[in-house]
Image: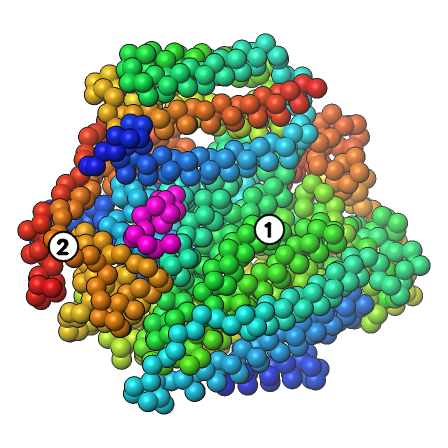
């Protein structure tokens, strides 16, 4: 037991001191991940306090009341319980839960909205959609689309709009923000911002079938200037994303990186607004396409309208 | 086996009391089962996809017939249990027979209703709403079907063995089951059909 | 369907499994024939309605499943021990972690607990059997054949591969086209109906069959935990029944409940699954709490501290267990309001749980603690489970969960709850009640060796996973690249898994060794314990109690021992009415197995025939007349004298 306590304290020390190679969760590169990292560290400290109390009591009881240390004729007394002790160990945990509840609600509000420091800026919107087993990123304003990598500018609020062309996936860039599910019949939103340029690991964290383990992407944070240059470059050099090409991309499999100078949002809109819940397929305007019928797109049997 | 003659026949032995309590608990589980099916139905009732909605397919006449038939059967089985308490085997069997006959009638109308829906293109596979509707109604209907088989078996036993603590116990438990199906139907009638037709 | 689609092919491990299944299925009948044990097996076990024998069968099945699920776990740890490992491919790994989850929760933890409650509860309340002995046998055989159905999926048709939670749309026909998830929906359905019946049976048993004088608040804590567990089962399992039925309809009958088009909702499955799934966690943990309460009181030689608050805290936990299911998917985008509410209800569970921890600690205070094997497991539970508990509070915080969700941190957390909670609990209970059932103790020396292997290796296996999770390693990944840096800690975890294996092998070896060499235990009360089950001789006779005990307080047996009194009234034995054995539950279970198997492959005609057969077994039951039998006074005297050595 002592060994375990040592392990825990050294583990805490390791992350608190922020040594050379901190754990991913404790190495945030944006305000949202920072908020969560702080929340987690706070809760670890609280929990360490609880563990300490339990372990001290436990060790005390075991050392003091083991039968080998007691007289052979010692008979333990009959004890019903103690009102005051019980009130103590009900009320203190309640206080702890209340404190943690306040922290939870506040931090959840923080990470579910545009980061405070950027509240007045117009966010960059990126649609991130998953299909087996890759990520598609569409930039509606810029009119460009990428596969399996995403470039974003630093110091600007970003909104990722998430949905899926198949199983539920979970969009996660640990160093920038917590994760959220991408689902086929609704759009969810992640708010984040990045304050340090660099390359960060992003992945699907929700099991989605055979090649789920390979469903990673690179999230690259660029300076505003670099970002603009990259957008310009894509617009000039990348090919168009046609519907046929997009259907091809949706087929199950693993892909490398791809870049296009148009998005799939025109012919295959995200399931939001009137497209939510997939109820408007066949009777919707035909120019909206029937792209949401995942069974036809997955098998690549889409009929052109 | 000890028989306590101060109690009605169905409660007269220790085993009988346990069985009745056990069946009440089972009905508790059945309530959870149907509540879950109702919850699924309410969640999906507007998810009609490209299929018809409730107001398109529900018709009052068959539903009213089903309701009246099933409610009457609940009444007749009550009379049957009353007759059983009075020790009138013949009356008890008659009322049980009527109950089962009404149950059969209910089932017949419900099957016709299902055929009409399917004929109109509203199948279980059409939309989430229809899947939930058919599953809820179908589960109730399957319970009625099972009840007919079960009730028939009990009726045969009463005929052969007379009103013993055992057969009385079985008949009483069966009546609880039948009343329960009636209660479920009242919920289906109010919250599926009436609400759907409005 | 072609034969090569029917049997799973192409993997050496699967061929090995096939060979071993064939060998075992030849060896068992051959052995039974050779030793002329067919009749014995049929008369004494397959047709039994005796709660003790049914309990023993549950526990044997659970131990078998522990090793099946354990092999899965070892393979998973072996595959991820080094980066880019090629031991298993993605598909095989997915099947293995799916079956590991299903088997460990539903076919190991559940039957182990149900087995112990079968053996112990009627004895603790001074009853001669459960309320519905025949139904009890039906429950067991439904569980058993449900478990068998899931297990044959490994070689016939393919195992489920969408995770034990089988989220849609992944588990739909489109993304999981093999019959694996058909096995899931049908095997769990069959076993689940059995469990529901067990819940009803034990609720009625505990409410109605207690010894005279045993008020609810004078019941042993284990019986209390089973009473509450039974209520949770009755409220939770019908939800699973519905969820699995809808899954079957979607996969095999083309309905649209969880479909991606025509109005289907994939989140509906997640909600239904966890409305059952979270209470399920408490179904396996509360009985363990009950076991620990018995063991700690016995080996501290002291009554349970704060008995009333222990009962109330279990009641509160059971209520809250139905109000927290959303914490399994905070990341589904419900918004701040919903997530906050469920965060708070989840954290609130830690309050009654904390009450229990402190009550156990204060039971030890002023006690006289002896470190027997069951007590070691109970004591190790406290510090290890507390880690599981506090990490649970951390996970309950919605914002933080956005970083823990789907990571190894979560995996570490629930293993820290379920292993020291449930697994240590059932092993402790197994050692504790073993002499009651078999009449001799398990060897203490071997038992302690196994304990230290298991307790230490457990921490080596699972503590590193906390760190891996905080470093961004997600669960269910069959492989990872070297650059992630996850290798060394995964290797450490593998070392721990090997240690755990050694511990469990020692545990089983102990059963073998003790059966051959341990001396018989003649007192019926080897631990100097407190509750009624120890007042009857070991092994317990068919009728449990020659005379029904009369109690007036909690731990009445303990006080009777001290005061040298008897718990039974003076007078002669009376004939005892007992139920008869019957083969109908077993045959019904077999019929359910075939029904499930045919349904899995959508072979409708055979399935309908099997279904009719099931109805036939029910009809047989309703028409049969079976009034049980009486154990005569002479027989009781003979048995009691033989077991107690002399006439009392």
Give me the residue at 60% from left, 83% from top: A9
Image quadrant containing the C terminus of chain A? top right
Q: Tell me which segment is drawn in magenta.
A: C200-215
B133 sits to left or right of A99: left
In the rendering, at what x and y percent does residue A14 appear? 65, 83
Which badge, 1 or 2, is on the more N-terminal residue?
Answer: 1
Measured in 3D between alpha carbons, the distance from the residue under mark 1 to the one under mark 2, in whole angstroms, is: 52 Å
Relative to A218, residue B116 above or below: above
Secondary structure state at the residue bearing disc 2: loop
The answer to whether residue C187 shows anywhere in this view is: no
In the rendering, at what x and y percent does residue C348 appear? 61, 61
Secondary structure state at the residue bearing disc 1: loop
Q: In the rendered image, which residue does mark 1 sit on?
A: C323
Count of number-bearing discs = 2
Give me the residue at 23% from left, 33% from top: B3
Q: Give the class, few, some or many, for how many residues have Cα within 10 Å of label 2's Cα (few <14, many ≥20).
A: few
C257 sits to left or right of B21: right
Chain for numbered disc 2 = C
Of the numbered discs in the image, which one, if any, rests on residue C526? none
- Asked if the stretch drawn in magenta spans residue A31, the answer is no
In the rendering, at what x and y percent does residue B80 appear? 37, 17
Relative to C402, residue C231 above or below: above
- Asked if the stretch drawn in magenta spans residue C214, the answer is yes
Numbered disc in front, either 1 or 2: 2
Of the numbered discs in the image, which one, if any, rests on residue C571? 2
The answer to whether residue C128 shows anywhere in this view is: yes
């Amino acid at each position: 037991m002592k060994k375990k306590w040592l392990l825990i304290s050294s583990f805490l020390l390791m992350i608190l001191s922020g040594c050379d190679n901190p754990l991913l969760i404790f190495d945030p590169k944006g305000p949202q991940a920072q908020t969560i990292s702080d929340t987690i560290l706070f809760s670890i400290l609280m929990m360490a306090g609880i563990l300490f109390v339990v372990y001290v009591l436990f060790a005390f009881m075991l050392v003091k009341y083991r039968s080998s240390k007691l007289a052979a004729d010692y008979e333990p007394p009959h004890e019903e319980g103690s009102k005051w002790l019980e009130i103590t160990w009900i009320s203190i945990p309640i206080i702890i839960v209340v404190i943690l509840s306040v922290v939870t609600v506040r931090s959840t509000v923080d990470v579910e909205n545009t980061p405070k420091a950027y509240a007045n800026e117009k966010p960059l919107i990126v649609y991130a959609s998953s299909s087996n087993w890759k990520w598609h990123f569409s930039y509606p304003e810029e009119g460009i689309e990428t596969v399996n990598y995403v470039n974003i500018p630093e110091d600007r609020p970003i909104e990722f709009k998430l949905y899926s062309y198949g199983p539920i996936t979970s969009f996660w860039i640990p160093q920038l923000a917590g994760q959220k599910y991408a689902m086929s019949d609704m759009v969810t939103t992640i708010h984040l911002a990045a304050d340090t340029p660099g390359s960060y690991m992003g992945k699907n964290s929700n099991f989605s079938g055979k090649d789920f383990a390979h469903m990673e992407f690179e999230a690259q944070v660029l300076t505003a200037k670099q970002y603009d240059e990259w957008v310009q470059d894509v617009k000039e050099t990348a090919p168009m994303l046609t519907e046929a090409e997009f259907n091809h991309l949706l087929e199950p499999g693993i892909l490398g990186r791809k870049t296009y100078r148009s998005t799939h949002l025109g012919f295959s809109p995200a399931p939001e607004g009137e497209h939510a819940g997939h109820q408007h397929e066949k009777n919707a305007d035909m120019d909206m396409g029937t792209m949401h019928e995942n069974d036809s797109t997955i098998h690549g049997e889409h009929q052109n309208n | 086996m000890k028989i306590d003659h101060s109690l009605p026949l169905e409660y007269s032995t220790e085993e009988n009391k346990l069985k009745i309590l056990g069946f009440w608990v089972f009905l508790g589980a059945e309530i959870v089962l149907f509540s879950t099916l109702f919850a699924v139905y309410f969640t999906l009732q507007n998810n009609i996809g490209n299929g018809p909605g409730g107001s398109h397919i529900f018709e009052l006449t068959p539903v009213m017939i089903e309701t009246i038939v099933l409610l009457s059967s609940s009444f007749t089985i009550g009379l049957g249990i009353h007759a059983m308490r009075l020790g009138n085997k013949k009356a008890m069997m008659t009322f049980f027979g009527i109950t089962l006959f009404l149950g059969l009638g209910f089932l017949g109308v419900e099957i016709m209703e299902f055929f009409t829906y399917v004929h109109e293109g509203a199948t279980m596979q059409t939309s989430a709403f229809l899947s939930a509707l058919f599953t809820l109604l179908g589960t109730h209907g399957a319970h009625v079907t099972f009840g007919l088989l079960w009730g028939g078996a009990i009726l045969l036993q009463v005929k052969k063995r007379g009103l013993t603590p055992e057969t009385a116990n079985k008949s009483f438990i069966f009546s609880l089951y039948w009343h329960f199906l009636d209660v479920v139907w009242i919920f289906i009638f109010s919250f599926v059909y009436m609400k759907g037709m409005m | 369907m072609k034969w090569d689609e029917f049997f799973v092919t192409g993997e050496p491990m699967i061929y090995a499994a096939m060979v071993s299944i064939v060998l075992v299925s030849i060896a068992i009948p051959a052995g039974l024939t050779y030793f002329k044990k067919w009749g014995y097996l049929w008369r004494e076990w397959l047709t039994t309605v005796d709660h003790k024998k049914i309990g023993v069968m549950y526990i044997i099945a659970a131990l078998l499943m522990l090793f099946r699920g354990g092999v899965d776990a070892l393979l998973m740890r072996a595959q991820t021990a080094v980066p880019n490992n090629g031991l298993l491919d993605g598909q095989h790994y997915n099947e293995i972690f799916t079956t590991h989850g299903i088997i460990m929760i539903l076919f190991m933890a559940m039957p182990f607990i149900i087995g112990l409650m079968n053996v112990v509860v009627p004895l603790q309340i001074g009853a001669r059997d459960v309320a519905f002995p025949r139904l009890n046998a039906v429950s067991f055989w439904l569980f058993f054949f449900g478990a068998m159905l899931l297990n044959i999926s490994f070689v016939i048709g393919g195992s489920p591969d969408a995770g034990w939670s089988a989220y849609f749309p992944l588990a739909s026909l489109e993304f999981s086209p093999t019959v694996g998830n058909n096995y899931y929906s049908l095997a769990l359905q069959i076993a689940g109906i059995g469990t529901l019946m067990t819940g009803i049976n034990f609720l009625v048993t505990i409410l109605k069959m207690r010894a005279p004088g045993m008020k609810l608040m004078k019941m042993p804590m284990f019986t209390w935990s089973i009473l509450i567990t039974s209520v949770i089962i009755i409220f939770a399992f019908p939800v699973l029944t519905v969820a699995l039925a809808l899954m079957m309809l979607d996969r095999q009958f083309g309905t649209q409940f969880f479909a991606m088009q025509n109005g289907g909702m994939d989140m509906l499955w997640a909600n239904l699954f966890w409305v059952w799934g979270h209470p399920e966690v408490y179904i396996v943990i509360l009985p363990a709490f009950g076991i620990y309460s018995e063991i700690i009181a016995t080996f501290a030689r002291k009554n349970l501290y704060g008995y009333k608050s222990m009962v109330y805290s279990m009641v509160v936990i059971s209520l809250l267990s139905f109000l927290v299911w959303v914490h399994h998917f905070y990341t589904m985008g419900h918004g701040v309001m919903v997530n906050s509410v469920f965060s708070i209800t989840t954290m609130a569970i830690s309050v009654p749980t904390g009450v229990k921890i402190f009550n156990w600690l204060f039971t030890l205070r002023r006690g006289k603690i002896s470190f027997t094997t069951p007590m070691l497991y109970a004591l190790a539970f406290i510090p290890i489970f507390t880690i599981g508990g506090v990490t649970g509070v951390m996970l309950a915080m919605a914002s933080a969960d956005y970083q823990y969700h789907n990571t190894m941190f979560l995996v570490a957390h629930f293993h820290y709850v379920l292993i020291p909670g449930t697994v240590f609990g059932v092993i402790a209970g197994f050692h504790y009640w073993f002499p009651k059932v078999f009449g001799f103790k398990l060897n203490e020396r071997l038992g302690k060796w196994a304990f230290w292997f298991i307790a230490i290796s457990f921490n080596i296996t699972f503590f590193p996973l906390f760190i891996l999770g905080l470093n961004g390693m997600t669960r269910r990944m069959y492989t990872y690249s070297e650059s992630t840096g996850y290798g060394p800690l995964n290797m450490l975890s593998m070392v721990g898994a090997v240690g755990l294996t050694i511990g469990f092998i020692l545990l089983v070896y102990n059963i073998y060794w003790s059966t051959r060499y341990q001396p018989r235990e003649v007192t019926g009360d080897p631990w100097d314990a407190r509750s009624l089950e120890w007042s009857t001789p070991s092994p317990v006779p068919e009728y449990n109690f020659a005379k029904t005990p009369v109690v007036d307080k909690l731990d009445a047996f303990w006080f009777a021992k001290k005061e040298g009194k008897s718990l039974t009234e003076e007078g002669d034995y009376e004939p005892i009415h007992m139920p008869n054995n019957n083969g109908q539950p077993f045959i019904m279970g077999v019929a359910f197995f075939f029904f499930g198997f045919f349904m899995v492959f959508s072979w409708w005609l055979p399935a309908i025939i099997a279904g009719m057969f099931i109805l036939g077994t029910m009809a047989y039951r309703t028409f049969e007349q079976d009034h049980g039998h009486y154990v005569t006074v002479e027989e009781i005297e003979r048995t009691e004298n033989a077991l107690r050595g002399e006439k009392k």
